[in-house]
Image (cartoon, rainbow, N blue to C red):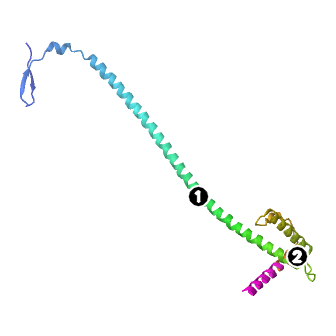
Amino acid sequence: MPVPLFLWDENDTPFQQEPDWDQVFALDISKQLHEYEVEYHVLQEEISTAHVDSEELKCVNQQNQELSEHLKIATRNIESLEITRATQLATINRQEAQIRSLELTVAVMGDFIGDLMDRPDIDIPGDVRRIVSCLIAEEKRRNTLKKSTIPLSTVSCELSASTKEAMGLLYTSGLHRAATKEEVRG
């Protein structure tokens, strides 16, 4: 005789149901257990794969962060180099202007000394005469090539100390003379 089994329905009311003991004892759950085991192993693999993927993601993120730092450093270096380049270009432009001014000064001095060389009462040292002849030759070459400046590097004249001193005096008197001409014009 079957043993009654009490169960509760949705309203929490007990009711009896007689179990089918033959079915309970004949139930084969090995197939379900095998399915659960397979599913368990699949989940374990997914978890381990996710862990490996997580490690790879951390590694990639770290590499990305390092590359980002390298990019920031490179960007700062480029900005610094651009600032340095702009400063150097400004310096070059300023120095080129100074060179043009000095070349003009040398040309004016050469003309002044050339005028003095034509006067018989003034004795011009040989080094100064040689420098003036170099300047005249360079000016002729420049006029031939139609250049606007005299490259000082092409003038290869050496000066003695006394000649440099004499040129300094001539330059000073030339400036005085130029100032006097300006005063007369004004």
Which image quarter: residue 25? top left
Give yes or no for residue 145 being in the magenta stretch.
Answer: no
Give the position of the C terminus as an image quadrant: bottom right
Find numbered disc 1 in the image and state the secondary structure of the residue it sits on.
helix
Q: Nearer the viewer, residue 133 or 34?
A: 133
- Label 2 sits on residue: 162
Residue 14 horizontal side relative to residue 29, left or right: left
Callout 1 crowding tier (Cα within 10 Å): few <14, some 14–19, many ≥20: few
* Amino acid carrying mark 1 in the image: Ser
Tell me, for residue 80, which label it has, or none: 1
Q: How far apart are the two marked residues, 2 and 1, measured between alpha carbons?
A: 48 Å
Q: Is residue 96 above or below residue 163?
A: above
Q: Is residue 79 above or below residue 115?
A: above
* Image: magenta residue range: 170-186
Q: What residue is drawn where x is 63% and y is 59%?
A: 85
* Amino acid carrying mark 2 in the image: Ser
> Could you say where residue 165 lies in the image, as x and y percent from the top left?
85, 77
